Amino acid sequence: MPPATGFTSYVDAILATLARDPSRTVLTGPEAPAGGGGPGTGSRPEVTAGELHATVHRMAAVFAAHGIGRGHTVSVLSGNRHEALAARYAANLLGARVVLLYDGMAAEALAKVAESAETVLLLVDPDLSGTAEALLGHLAGARPTVLTLGPTPGRTLGPDLLADCAALPSPEREGAGGTPFPAVASAAGPEDDWCIRYTGGTTGIPKGIRMAHGPYAALVAQMGSADGAPPRFLACTSLAHLAGILSDVALAAGGSVVLHRAFDPGAVLAAIDRERITHLWLLPPLLYRLLDDPALPGTDLGSLTSISYGGCAASPSRLMEAVKAFGPVLYGMYGMSEALAITTALPEDHQPTGPGGRITVGRALPGVELTVRDEAGKILPTGEQGEIWVRSASVMTGYWKQPEESARALPGDGWLRTGDAGCLDDEGRLYLVDRFKDLIIVVGGHVHPAEVEDLLHTHPAVSECAVFGVRTADEAEEVHAAVVPLPGRAVDTGALRAFVTEHKGALYAPAAVHLVDEIPLTPVGKPDKNRLRTRTAAG
């Protein structure tokens, strides 16, 4: 069915591609979990293009019956399963915005996100039923409608969305185009939000990044036309993060997606060999785990054409190891939720030519403008280090209902202040040097220290604390906390880690808690986290 708005969204593009060859398998996996928590059972579902097309329309029909449409928020709490992809497409088809809730965050934090986004419909993976119940228990306002992505034995969360879809009339052909019934007209406009992606907030209040349909549809089309060949993408990291975006790109380009529940280096290497994977996305620490896996030398890597990486700093020495191991298939990606993709480093760019022996994150993508500026916003000459500013059609429209934060990040004329420090060379290559934002990028997401500090200050044994990031030898980051105990109170560092995990989730738990007599301060009276990092390295 043609879009009612006259605008072709990324969902419209995917559905049109699916309709061209309904018998083609487009989604494989994930492998069914074993009952004992060990390796999977070996059962891997396969979904054809026609089945996915029909499921999206059926889910959209069920959502519409619940009153979902433009201006509504649908939150999805799910692991990597094909039903979650279909549900996102269905909600976006109706013009509703989607919030992707991260598995691994504490229920209390998830509830804050769901409430902030004004969720009216919550979709729940049956495997996360317990988390969903806890989330609902933390809500201060009205409970949203809940639908589950399959049966939830022993729990009563809400109707089974898949059962409701199956109860709809059987597909019938109607009209010259042969569109399957029930077909739902696309309602999204280019300025509507397809997604609100949440980051941690320095004040403890999460920031929701508004992502509009228009630029996202353009990005999906642009990325899918990079090499012309239909990709076979392995999604082995969370679909709530970049793996979901690259799944959209693969499906819109006529390719297919293999789903894994989580990253496991041995399983990834086996899948590359068995499934003839062409495209893979990894955070640098996960790339290192592939390099260190004993199965790598015996793995047939001949199908790989692209291993893209990004999301945190990468070790130049380990990237050079990856070049030797995988060949000229590495693509560095620099981007952020506020601006999507900004630069790409091509395989030939992987040489340590930048300051401190850094490898470039590449040149600006088509349609992206980059400048490096000083604190006053003045553009700096080539080679000088400052804050990276970016302007493109993909820059966010602002933070959800946080105008002051939006004004700080968006100074005007379409520019976004990234909060990252870097420099440009004479040929337009960008090098990242440091991060202006007090942000710790760990495997799985972002941690704002103030969120953990605020929580630790509520603990009865803590007088003062400072939370900071520490880089490992592989340039990965870990969360560390320096804690001053209250006089006369004993502090169990393991109990503090468990306290953070309980209230914020494992993502935020410090890798180490350091007991100190006092928190060092800068001349202006702020915690001196650089000195804490130096002490940690010396220790």
Image: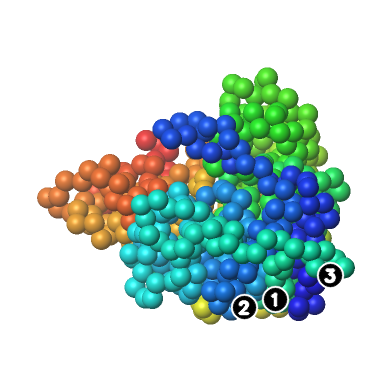
Specify the amino acid type for callout 1: Ala
Residue drawn at the location 33% of the way across and 56% of the way down: 503
Q: Position of residue 264 (x, y in %)?
A: 55, 34
* Mark drawn on residue 9: none
- Displayed quadrant of residue 42: top right
Report which residue position mark 3 lands on. 175
Specify the amino acid type for callout 2: Arg
What distance separates the C-alpha of mark 1 from that of mark 2? 7 Å
Q: Which element carries disc 2, helix, strand or loop?
A: loop
Can you say whether 251 is above or below 205 in the image? above
Report which residue position mark 1 lands on. 187
Looking at the image, tell me whether mark 1 or mark 2 is earlier in sequence order.
2
Q: Position of residue 277 (x, y in %)?
A: 73, 36
Please indicate, yes or no, whether residue 493 appears anywhere in the rendered image. yes
Q: Are marks 1 and 2 in contact (CB under 8 Å)?
A: yes
Which numbered mark, 3 or 1, is in the foreground of this view? 3
Which numbered mark, 2 or 3, is in the foreground of this view? 3
Report which residue position mark 2 lands on. 70
Q: Position of residue 35 (x, y in %)?
A: 43, 35
Apparent side of residue 34 relative to residue 296 in the rendered image (left or right): left
Can you say whether 356 is above or below 104 in the image? above
Residue drawn at the location 59% of the way across and 54% of the way down: 83
Specify the amino acid type for callout 3: Gly
What distance separates the C-alpha of mark 3 from that of mark 1? 20 Å
Q: Are marks 2 and 3 in contact (CB under 8 Å)?
A: no
Q: Quadrant of the N terminus?
A: bottom right
Q: How many marks?
A: 3
Q: Nearer the viewer, residue 233 or 39?
A: 39
